[in-house]
Amino acid sequence: MTIAITTATISEQLHAIADAQPFITRFLVRNLHTGETIGRGENEETPSASTRKTSIMMAALKAAHEGRLDLDSAITYEERLKHEVASGMFRYMTPGIVISLRDAIVGMMVLSDNVCTKMVLERLTLEEVDSYCKAIGMAGTHHRFLIPPLGLKPDHSLGEVTTTTAADQILLLEAILAAQDDEAAAARLGTSVELCRFALQTLKNQILRYGIRSRLPFEAVVASKSGRGKRGRMDAGLVYRDNRPLYCIAVFTDAVPQVMADGTPGYTIALETIGLLSKACWDAF
């Protein structure tokens, strides 16, 4: 006899996974077949880390759609761009390499390369990206800095970094998903169907397989952007099964200890928690 998994049952499972750890876990999950939603602190402001880059990408694509930026324009990798950078591969490469703005966006997303992030943000402004978020309904997202300083303390305040909410990340991901074949939905993002398809494919090209993807079948398609912050780990994405969007999930861990009581690095358990939450949804939906 097949036992139906109710929303209440999966909700209990998700909260139990979060309750099992001493740190804060905020999340929002939506079953994209039924529309049912389960949340935990999803409207609470939290460090965004690199999950912010999805909104940076969309703000850049809006500027391209309006003709203010050219995705084919050439950008030269300069020595200065690697300063205060802790992610990606460009910082290890020889200055002088020339790539397009389009490729800088791809590098920012699929490798979370912060040299590429600087390349993109230097053609926008933080105010522009922040206003873009507010305009599309991401009221809890605040872009404050180009690149977080390397010396940021683990107990830094929210005002020292860009912040977001799990609900805001779900709103953005679902908006991009809807806009892949709907001009009106794309217009609400200030872009086009073609640009939103590019954005969605870029999210699918993410190569980092921890967090949301870590306990799913290797071939599972996930369109996501993860983050690594001093206070925790985070991940937000759309998960597909049989080429159909199955669920959308955003998880933000916070106040994660540097070392757990058993000696395990805190970030390891934070990422495992995200993976367990995603796997529970995969099994239930």
Image (spheres, rainbow, N blue to C red):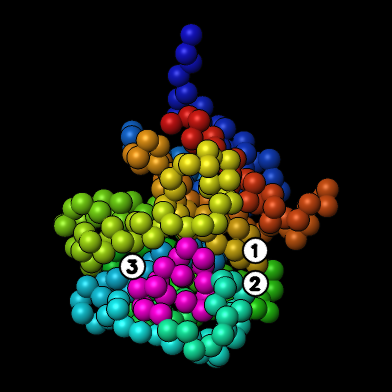
Mark on residue 156? 2
Give the image quarter of residue 74: bottom left
Q: Residue at x 45, y 25 (%)?
A: 6
Q: Position of residue 49 (x, y in %)?
A: 54, 66
Which stretch did the figure color magenta?
Answer: 99-116
Helix, strand or loop at disc 1? loop
Mark closer to the observer (1, 2) = 1
Residue at screen point 65% across, 51% down = 270
Left or right position of 102 against 226: left
Q: Is residue 126 visible?
A: no
Q: Earlier in the sequence, mark 1 or mark 3?
A: 3
The question of residue 68 being in magenta is answered with: no
Q: Mark 1, residues whose alpha carbon is within 10 Å: few (<14), some, or many (≥20)?
A: many
Relative to 181, say whether 242 is above or below: above
- Which secondary structure lies at badge 2? loop
Do labels 1 and 2 touch, CB within 8 Å? yes
Q: Which residue is mark 1?
A: 231
Q: Nearer the viewer, residue 119 or 28?
A: 119
- Residue depicted at x 53% and y 51%: 251
Q: Nearer the viewer, residue 70 or 154?
A: 70
The chief SS type of the magenta part is helix
- Tell me which label, 1 or 2, sits earlier in the chain: 2
Q: CA distance from mark 1 to mark 2?
A: 8 Å
Question: Residue 113 magenta-drawn?
Answer: yes
Residue 130 position in % (x across, y down) = 38, 74
Rendering coords of residue 62 (x, y %): 26, 71
Q: Tell me if I can see residue 21 in this picture.
A: yes
Q: What's the distance in space between the residues labelled 2 and 3, CA to CA?
A: 28 Å
Task: Give the side of residue 190 with respect to residue 81, left or right.
Answer: left
Q: Which residue is mark 3?
A: 58
